[in-house]
Amino acid sequence: MKILSSSQIKSCDIATTESGVSSLNLMERAAAKCVEWIEMNFKTTNRFLIFCGTGNNGGDGLATARMLYEKGFDVEVYIDRANLNFKADAEINFRKIKKISGIEIKDFSDFSKTIKEKTVLIDALFGYGLNRKLSGKVKNLVETLNQTTLPKVSIDIPTGLFADKVIEKDSVVFKADFTLTFQFYKRSFLHPETGRFCGKTEVLDIDLDSKFIEDAKTDYFVIDNSIIRKIYKPREDFSNKGTFGKSILVGGSYGKIGAVLMSSLSALRTGSGLTFTMAPDCGNLILQSQIPEAMFISSGKNYICKIEIQDKAIYGIGPGLGKEKQTQKALLEFLKSYKNPVVLDADALNILAENQNLNLIPKHSVITPHPLEFERLFGKTENSFDRIELAKEKAKDSQIFIVLKDHHTAIITPDKKVYYNITGNSGMAKGGSGDVLTGIITSLISQKYEIKEACIFSVWLHGKAGDFAAEEFSRESMLPTDLINKIGEVFKSLN
Ligand SMILES: NC(=O)C1=CN([C@@H]2O[C@H](COP(=O)(O)OP(=O)(O)OC[C@H]3O[C@@H](n4cnc5c(N)ncnc54)[C@H](O)[C@@H]3O)[C@@H](O)[C@H]2O)[C@@H](O)CC1
Ligand SMILES: Nc1ncnc2c1ncn2[C@@H]1O[C@H](COP(=O)(O)OP(=O)(O)O)[C@@H](O)[C@H]1O
Ligand SMILES: [K+]
């Protein structure tokens, strides 16, 4: 799914109205979608307090208020009585509301924190039209609303956020439990500084102009099910182990054999035809007894001392590798003579960062840094939006794929496209989850998925397996190995 900027969304709204739908109708459509969702999700609630601004977001709120009232709910509308300067469509909706005697219209200052139970707060103060941080009455109101424990729903965007940029550190933002957004994810929903205000995001289809959307140019995408369906290649019947590639997972050191073990197991669980683990001898017994399907390639005693080059294999290097001098030398020597794409993670990246040898990374390789590893490689940035921009430059300069791991991992391609992942959960914030991802990416590349597609599919699959694991074991209790065991269920869901 494309992510458009706020100015592109505005143009898309205009294109839609030019194709024959009036802007008032569009607002009606947007509100109807919100009401439909609200009815489905707040079955026992009977009272809605709707906070409206004077722009189109406020207009959506006013139309939502009317429709909820018509469905028999109790509704109170809160506005700034000192500023009734509504935009055209909002004005029409305000007049409609005024005619309904059953809807109370109150001033922001009338809101009391001691509110009855079974009440939901709906934020329609500002949408993507916000152009500066909140101040004055709206800021005070949002601060007060945030202090209540009532469920909170934002229409389109939590008030105080911009669609596609970071907020200042001291900004006040409505802290939603749910955000009902129209047609597109906004980039700010996907970044840590801003996404934490959105709660669960629901994208409501309001049928904006499909031709405009198809033609719109953007560098940013959300990985949705339709992308995955296009990428996924069901396993062929007329095949053998050679059909599904050879993965070599390189890593492990004394005390960290588990990391490369999990990578190897993940490669197997995602379909790798032949899977090898290249690890020091101290790992042999552990690996052979835990994963008999993987073959062992010995390299050193307690840490990797040499990375042997084999034909027609895809290498995933880094999990549990450590940074012993000889390991560093082995990695650098391998990279000096190996020219095919590789997957590099964890200490492989730290070794390259310390030696400033980024130019050794073969073209079209995949690197999978978390934010700190990224910083070690490429330097500090002010915020996560700047980090993505820096990653775009670096991916292009080095012609590599950067899988920037986070709550919403982003894949940055050499042609500067950014794909955000929306599967996964905080149960994955445990040592070992990254090792699993390295194994999956290596396995999919060895099965001849295009590198970009392998990255997209792997990150999605990893997160989805994490979601299944959380469902069964809880976020607290689930382990990276549970996640590996759930990969099969994810594949089943695709078949
Ligand atoms: N046809 C459309 O344009 C559609 C728009 N929709 C809604 O329209 C919203 C966008 O509407 P608008 O462009 O009217 O923008 P908003 O309703 O977000 O903001 C209204 C106006 O407030 C002013 N403003 C910005 N920041 C401010 C601040 N910090 N303090 C005080 N005033 C400030 C700006 O002049 C802005 O135009 C979307 O988020 C969505 O909710 C939906 O109705 C769907 C269709
Ligand atoms: N809060 C979270 N929500 C979703 N995914 C997460 C979260 N925390 C971690 N992950 C995922 O788990 C993996 C962690 O990788 P990494 O930080 O390298 O850990 P490790 O090296 O210990 O395995 C990444 O793929 C990341 O996206
Ligand atoms: K809003």
Image (tube, rainbow, N blue to C red):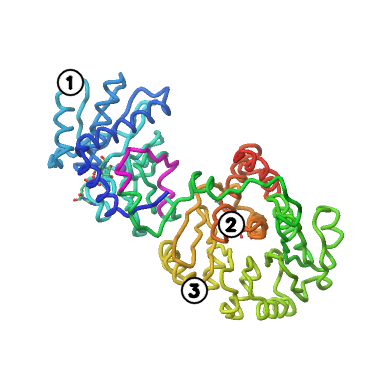
Q: Quadrant of residue 43?
A: top left
Q: Which residues are magenta?
A: 194-211
Left or right: residue 164 versus residue 252 is left
Residue type at the position of mark 1:
Ser
Q: Position of residue 160 (x, y in %)?
A: 31, 50
Left or right: residue 418 versus residue 210 is right
Q: Position of residue 148 (x, y in %)?
A: 38, 37
Q: Which mark is in front, 1 or 2?
A: 2
Residue placed most toward the observer, 486 or 382: 486
- Magenta stretch: residue 208 in it? yes
Badge 1: few (under 14), some or many (20 or more) residues near its Cα, within 10 Å?
Answer: few
Residue denoted by label 2: 454
Residue denoted by label 3: 379
Residue at screen point 29% across, 53% down: 8
Element class at badge 1: loop
Residue at screen point 35% across, 50% down: 214
Left or right: residue 85 versus residue 372 is left
Q: Quadrant of residue 112?
A: top left
Q: Quadrant of residue 77?
A: top left
Residue type at the position of mark 2:
Ala
Q: Position of residue 301 (x, y in %)?
A: 84, 72
Residue at screen point 63% across, 58% down: 448
Element class at badge 2: helix
Q: Position of residue 5 (x, y in %)?
A: 32, 55
